Image (cartoon, rainbow, N blue to C red):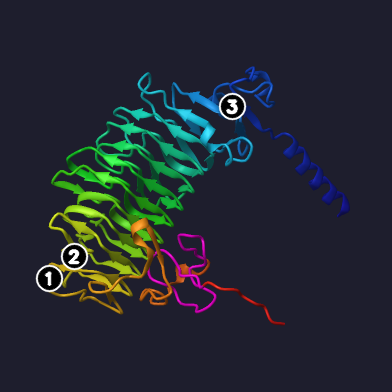
Amino acid sequence: LIKRNVFVLLTGFALSADAFDRYVSLDGTNDAGNGYNTWAGAATQIQWAVSAAGAGETVWVSNGIYYLTNQIAIGNVKLRSWPDGSSRRDTTIVNGNYPAYTNRCFLLNNAAALAEGFTITNSCSSGIAQGSAVTITAGTLRNCLVTGNITTDTTHSAGVYLSGASSVATNCRVEINIGYQYGAGVYLTSSARLLNCRVFSNRTTSATFGRGAGVHMDSGSLVDGCHITGNMSTNGTTTFGGGIFSDGGTIRNCLIARNSAYSGAVYFRGVTAMENCTVVSNYSAYQPGIVLNAAAACTIRNVIAWRNRYSAALDIDIWDQKTATVPTYYTNCAFGLVYDAAAPAAKPWRGVNNIDLSAVSPGFVDPQAGNYRLQESSPCVNAGIYQAWMAGSMDLDGHARIDRFFGIVDMGCYEYLPGGIMFKVR
């Protein structure tokens, strides 16, 4: 028994000794014979080191600007900026080299694939579907800045395209990307996930059928803990969802603010659940706020929607085109004004415990400065309803969704935190 244990330990040691880190540096000498396994012999092209890496190995990339001639395909490999995948993100730059080349920067196609700590910019996928900068069919994009990318493709994203339940973008900034029709910032499909990201100032340019300048989502995808702000669909007569266009999925713990489109800051065409979000200060030329036009029932729970304006200089926060046969269920929500196609003069009529904000304020700390956290006196504090997903979940500031003082969730994307000093008595 003792000999068997010793054999297993030695075998495990031998396997780990065969694994190498690989290195990429603009100052490297391209020592392909040794697999770029030292900084001195580092590859000068990222793809060379990625191709040399074995399953589960890590490729470290020194800071600098790496101009591409082809996309970087990442399988079961971790690609990280040196030294920690974090501190040098803004100076470790992957440049798509447009207009000299028209190719995306990254393709992740393995559940264990990781790209972490890069600025990804200046790509243009001319006629290439999916993502201009990044396409993920499986794997994780983490702590990356995706900015300044464009696409001429009619349907998919200039920024990040994710497809499949093992496709994740987390702790990223996706900003100032220009798309044509769908999801200029992020396109999610087939249960993909966008977590703790900032999607800012992305734009679609098509005057017809522009959908989701910030995020386009469908097929059970999840957007959780994200800032979706300042995105714009060009003001044609058929542009929808300046912040988010949803053909189905779940939106949680998100701030959706200062987005614009012809119709809706958030547009539901598929069955969607929105929970604990704050939808505020968005603008639409026609149908403002959250536009509900799904073919089946949707759920809106613990949501604050306020001061969403349209061209008639009115604030309408929910534009509900559904009828009693295809209802939208509002529970524990706070709205300023709802336009209900089935009962235009009524307030929300398919739900319980809703707060009418048409004559009162939601009690934000400083909405003029963009601070939509709640004051202690807010009617939205301790006004939410518990859901199973909240156990261990965080609000948009990273605080526990269920606070330790009252154990009751608040409405919106932020939990109110009492001030003062806490003493521990033994």
Q: Which residue is mark 1?
A: 342
Q: Residue at x 50, y 65 (%)?
A: 393
Please state the horizontal and vertical placement of residue 241, each as a whole percent of the image. 25, 51
Q: CA distance from mark 2 to mark 1?
A: 8 Å
Q: Which residue is mark 2?
A: 320
Q: CA distance from mark 3 to mark 1?
A: 61 Å
Disc 2 residue type?
A: Asp
Q: Majority secondary structure of the magenta segment?
A: loop
**Secondary structure type for disc 1:** loop
Instruction: Tell me if I can see residue 288 in this picture.
Output: no
Q: Left or right: 30 with respect to 242?
A: right
Q: Which residues are magenta?
A: 393-418
Please say if the residues under marks 3 and 1 sit with CB atoms less than 8 Å apart: no
Q: CA distance from mark 3 to mark 2?
A: 53 Å
Q: Magenta segment: does it hold 296?
A: no
Instruction: Tell me if I can see residue 323 in this picture.
Output: yes
- Which circle's residue, 2 or 1, is located before the other in the chain? 2
